[in-house]
Amino acid sequence: MSAGRYFLLAWRLARRDWRSGELGVLLSALVIAVAATAATRLFSDRLARTMVDHAAEFIAGDLTLASHRQIPPEWIRQAEILGLKHAASVEFPSVLMENDQILLTGVKAVSPAYPLRGELRTRDAEAAEDKPAGGIPPLGTVWVESRVLGTLDLTLGASLTVGSAQFRIARLLTHEPDRRGDLYSLSPRVIMNLGDLPVTRIIQPGSRVHHYDMFAGEDTAVRRFKSWLKPRLQHGERLLDVHEDRPEVGTALSRAERYLGMTSVMVVLIAGVAIGMSARRYTERHSDMTALLKCMGAERNDILTIHVFVLMIVSLPGALLGSALGYFVQAGIARSVAGLLPRGLTQPGLESLLTAPLMGLIVLAGFAVPPLLGLMRVPPLRVLRRDLGPTPPSVWLSLGFAILALGALLLRAAQDPVLVGLVLAGGTAALAGFHLCLGGMLRALPALLRQRPLVWRLGVHSLLRRRRLASFQIMGFGLAMAAMLISHVVQKELVSEWKRQLPDNAPNFFALNLQETELDRFRQMLEADSIESSEIYPIVRGRLVTVDGTDARKLAPKDSQAEAAVERDLSLTWSEALPAGNRLVQGSWWSGAPQRVSVEEKLAAELGIRIGARLTFDVAGTPVPATVESIRNVSWDAMTPNFYMIFSPGSLQGQPRTYMTSFHVPSEQTTMLNALVKAFPAITLLDVDALLKQFQSILQQVTLAVQVVLGFATVAGFTVLFGAVHATAEGRLRDDALLRAIGADTPLLKSSQWIEFASLGFLAGILAAACTELVGAVVFSRMMNLTPQAHPWLWLAAPCLGAITVGVAGRWSVRRVVNTSPNDVLRDLP
């Protein structure tokens, strides 16, 4: 038979089924599945784009190029051709001298378009409130931080000499969006107009200068420009990304983006359960027609082909309708939460608009095809003996198709084949183990119920008469519940982690250049004002030179975090104990051998550093060797001192060093900082309060994002769960009608139905708890970079929640049985 004839027959069958209502449940499940997937996917994409746009303020643009030279004009022309905006800044250290005072500052010269993202904020007077600057310093003027005035004994309007030129101090600088974490950027700041830079005569051949070129525009144009620019970068030039250049923000964003992607897949899994159960019901109701077709000469492949075409005919309008419904749902959610975000949500990308229908079709293929395979095994004799039905598909065959579909979607969301393999292996192991236990529990139930009341035996024996169906339903409900619980547990742990890392008293000041002789007096001053500080760390400036005898610069990938690290002096330290926020991933913490070092995980991966590697550092012209003893994961988003390299005690003995720490100063106690500066005139106090507030604003958006998406996923999950129960409840109607026909009263039927569905939900809850613990452990450790946590409450909450939810949904779906005469029920059922 040709494909055209198959399609024509499928079209006629679909029209007949539509008129008779046969396709209603399957189409409804598909629409709900695609709508839930589309809404979650689109809303997650909008949230992710909004967060990235906001986080782009940390680098003052969508893309920033860092270099030690002025970039070629053709690069800027290419950006303009692609419709991108451009701004530039030049940063360098400079020693200022006024009123017999000397101060090392970080000077920043900016072009008129700066910043492309974010805003400069200034004050017109010491006591005035800061406000958006609305531009950059006019020619002949500078904006400075208040620390410059205090240290150099100057006032607003006074003259400040920078290099060979004098400038009028016009405003006090309170915030710049792209302030970086290097030593000179954290020094007291002076911002000037880029047009004034030549007259200062500071920039000379060999001067240590950093050029930053910022670009901003449409996401597609930025990606095209980035692809065009990367092959043209020279050694020492790199593209800054908020995920890598600002790890304290990038870590939070990466976790949020992974969570949103994971939640989208969880909603897909929930929807897939409903589609699979609806397809099973569709299969059961088409057994008679399939047997008739076989009597007329149809082969097994003919049957499958016809029904696949029917699925295609249903899936296309279902996918489009579900996508449209999902778009309007997420638009309504976005409108309701828009006021809670600092800026309006960006529009979803074209890729997300097209992905939702495709994901729906993948789910349909993965979860609906296995039940249809049962139609191929319907015996022709069913036309005479209706008790002969299709052989139900193997549970493992159904799971195999579902796992393939789910794996494809997980791989797209996580971009980590190992992680996807671990998640699927953990989930499959939980299902396999539970399937074995379930068979034993179902076989043991009759003996346990011999002495129980009739209502209990009646309810549980309804499950035992259909063990294969019961197993399929328990696994389906368990997977749906596990998807909701995994999203909830991960969301809870993420928010808790962010609150733990950035509590209300998170450090907002760093103290640098402390001398060893000043440490005791410094601690006493902080204690006198009841101010707690983090650990005080020694700092030795040094550069990584070789790794196992190979030049470290040759090992660093181009435009990478490692390249930036080996091109500059690092802050080296030593510590007896593993610092808070650090976690060993390889090796051990100090075996007692001399000259040992612990390396940050990502830097080690990019440079190919392994346990036992020999590193050489250049410290003030002296080579310092060290052997790698451990590799650490560092929590960069904690506002405390963090380091790429930590040496064992004694390894840097005799090297020149200073000390640093961080501490929190409440707003009502900031006056103590003046006393601190007077008592320790050589120290540098770094005010990161503005950075902290900006970071906390990002985390508020991230937290809101995961909470809203979790709420939507939970609502969608319960909606689909109710629909799935309704789709599988038809098979019980005949049995209940027969019981009423032989005299069973209404209270007995209602109670037995409650027990039957509650038992299904209870067992599904146990499966959900097991899957959540196993898969959650993998997600925490590999996807979210968090320490896995046990959740004992799951083993009580999940079975109870399953019993209540499935019990209510099941009882509601068959409520008409007790309100309809047995004759009507038996006549209407096939």
Image (cartoon, grey):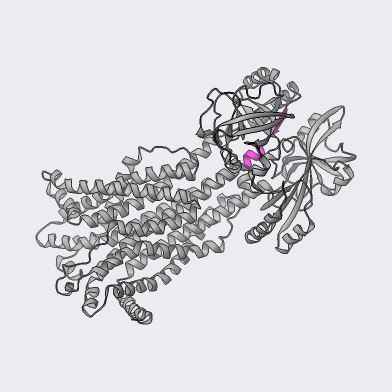
Image coordinates of residue 719 in percent, x first then y, are 37, 57
691 is within the stretch colored magenta: yes
Furthest residue in direction left, as rendered: 742
Residue at (25% x, 53% y) in the render: 471
Whether residue 264 is visible, yes or no, is: no
Judging depth in this view, the residue of 320 and 67 nearest the camera is 67
* Quarter occupied by the C terminus: bottom left
> Does residue 581 appear left or right of residue 10 in this picture?
right
Q: Residue at the front extreme?
A: 549
Locate residue 657: give its quadrant. top right
- Identify which residue, 671 or 270, lies in the foreground: 270
Residue 307 on the magenta segment: no
Q: In this view, does 452 lie above or below 591?
A: below
Image-based side of 367 in relation to 349, left or right: left
x then y, percent, for residue 808? 28, 53
- Quarter of the rendering occupied by the N terminus: bottom left
Q: Where is residue 393 in the image (x, y as percent from the top left)?
A: 27, 61
Q: Residue at x 23, y 70 (%)?
A: 287
Which region shows up in magenta? 681-694
Q: Can residue 372 be seen in this view?
A: yes
Residue 242 in the image: above or below residue 626: below
For this rendering, which residue is in front, 801 or 256?
Answer: 256
